[in-house]
Image: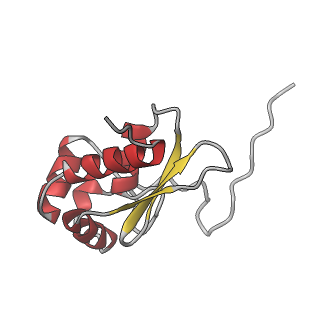
Amino acid sequence: MKRMSERATVRQQTHDLLDSLGGTPAEVAGSLVNLGVRGVPASSRECAIAAYLDAVVSADARIQGVKVCKNEVLVERVGWWRRSVVVTLPAAVRQFVVAFDARQYPGLLRPAAPSTRAPGGSVPPVPHPST
């Protein structure tokens, strides 16, 4: 029996994860909502798909991170000498990414971080501790 290479294994496992989200963009969105995933539109490292994959694969010691592009995801492996594994996005996930970037799934948007700027755009002074 032929053993799969590490790259082939990572590629297949990532493809299976993406494929399991659903066969339509709406099913993909529903799966992500059910999993409690939130993301940032137009962010290759923080979109909803990247957040999902990062949460699932972060326990794998072989994986350093993920980057979601228009048609594919790059699974970055640990070690500067190891090339990223390129996984083509299934059609439903690809269509979801386009719709998510267009903010068509507001329930999946990560809330904005509170602003640290004072009214008028200036940065508030940092209080000094009393001595």
Residue 46: x percent and y percent? 45, 55
Q: Is residue 52 visible?
A: no
Q: Nearer the viewer, residue 102 or 19?
A: 19
Q: How many marks?
A: 0
Q: Residue furthest top?
A: 131
Q: Is residue 65 above or below residue 44?
A: above
Q: Would you say 90 lies left or right of 130 here?
A: left
Q: Position of residue 24 (x, y in %)?
A: 12, 63
Q: Quadrant of residue 54?
A: top left
Instruction: Identify the residue shown where x is 29% and y is 70%.
Output: 103
Q: How is the image coloured?
A: secondary structure
> Which residue occupies the foreground of this view, 125 or 39?
39
Is residue 46 found left or right of 96 in the rendered image? right
Residue sitting farthest toward the front: 1
Q: Position of residue 98 (x, y in %)?
A: 29, 73
Viewport quadrant of the C terminus: top right
Q: At 35% across and 39% down in the image, what residue appears?
A: 2
- Where does the N terminus fall, quadrant-wise? top left
Identity of the residue furthest to the right in this view: 131
Question: 120 or 8: nearer the eye?
Answer: 8
Is there any visible trace of residue 124 in the rendered image? yes
Percent position of residue 129, x then y: 80, 31
x 41%, y 45%: residue: 10
Looking at the image, residue 25 lies above or below residue 61: below
